[in-house]
Amino acid sequence: MTITQLRYVLAVAEAKNFTKAAEKVFVTQPTLSMQVQKLEDELDVKIFNRSKKPIELTPVGIQIIDQAKNIVNESERISDIVDQQKGFIGGEFNVGIISTVMPTLLPMFLKAFINRYPKVNLKIEEMTTEVMIDRIKKGKLDAGIAATPLEDEMIVEKPVYYEPFVAYIPQNHSLSNRREIKEEDLDPEEILLLEDGHCFKDNILNLCKSVHAQPIEKKFFLESGSFETLMRLSDEGLGMTLLPYLHSLDLPEKKSQNIIAFAAPHPAREISIIHHKNQLKIQLVEALQKLILGVVKGAIQFQNVNIISPQKS
């Protein structure tokens, strides 16, 4: 049994097809099939049911695949240990970012990271926190950038910055003449929210619950996947919305006039780099954490920002 054979069976299990699996691991289909067959012969079991289309795992194959994932992941950590000892910052680094952070944060650090660490093969994907955690646990993602705390014992959270909330209040709104607002000024019934699956929606609901004891009831339900849509709806007199502070920095002048900050202590969300508790690419995680902190520090012009209450992503 070899690590290469285990990589091949994992590729087949994921692709459910020998030809596609061979393409994924950059070998010919006969070579991959021969190695998988050799492993099955050695173990004296059938890992795959080849009569099914697409190919399915046998009952014992399911157990073998689970163990193979652990073995392959741990074997890859040997290289991580060596890199860490040498202080080498390079190699593959797969990072996930939640959608309410990606558009504003990525342009702030990506070019600088690429220039500073040219030996890193950085791959970034936008995803929900739920998917991010699942992929980190399965070893398919090295790290993520998400709103925390998550309260998952398998995940390590490294807070990078606290991003204040700001209100987007159109000119004809009753709060539009305020220089700043307070949490108790919010009317949960008129706040336009992102659709389910966005942790920023949960942040806002938690904020509203902290100052309104009664259950939140809305006269109508209207949820969107983008802040831009919510702002346009606010402009039409359908309510107000809340934005992450960094998102408000790039608004055109006409819309930026509708931004009103909260009074101190500013409600905010904690943004962290997260990774598996057994992650050994710590040098890469720390490099990314340090760079992001540097670029964001100058952008967020709030002092003594505090999170009002623990907020789950």
Image: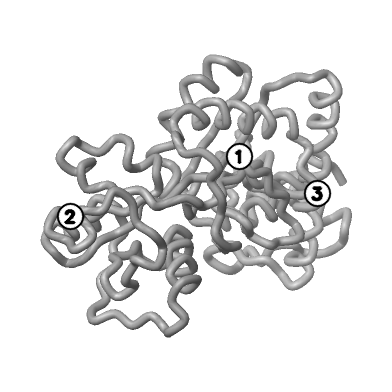
Please, what secondary structure does the residue beneath circle 1 have? Answer: strand
Please, what secondary structure does the residue beneath circle 2 have? Answer: loop
Observer-nearest of 186 and 177: 177
Mark linked to residue 73 = none
In whole angstroms, how far apart are the C-alphas of marks 3 and 2?
Answer: 68 Å
Q: Is residue 265 above or below residue 64?
A: above
Tell me the mark number nearer the camera, choosing from 3 and 2: 2
Observer-nearest of 265 and 45: 265
Residue linked to disc 3: 38
Going 60% across and 34% down the picture, which residue do you hit?
26
Please state if 169 lies on the left or on the right of 11 as rendered: left
Residue 260 in percent (x, y) is at: 30, 49
Going 76% across and 42% down the picture, which residue do you hit?
279
Quadrant (top left/top right/bottom left/bottom right) for the C terminus = bottom right
Please state if 31 lies on the left or on the right of 76 as rendered: left
Mark linked to residue 170 = 2
**Quarter assignment of residue 118:** top right
Residue linked to disc 1: 160
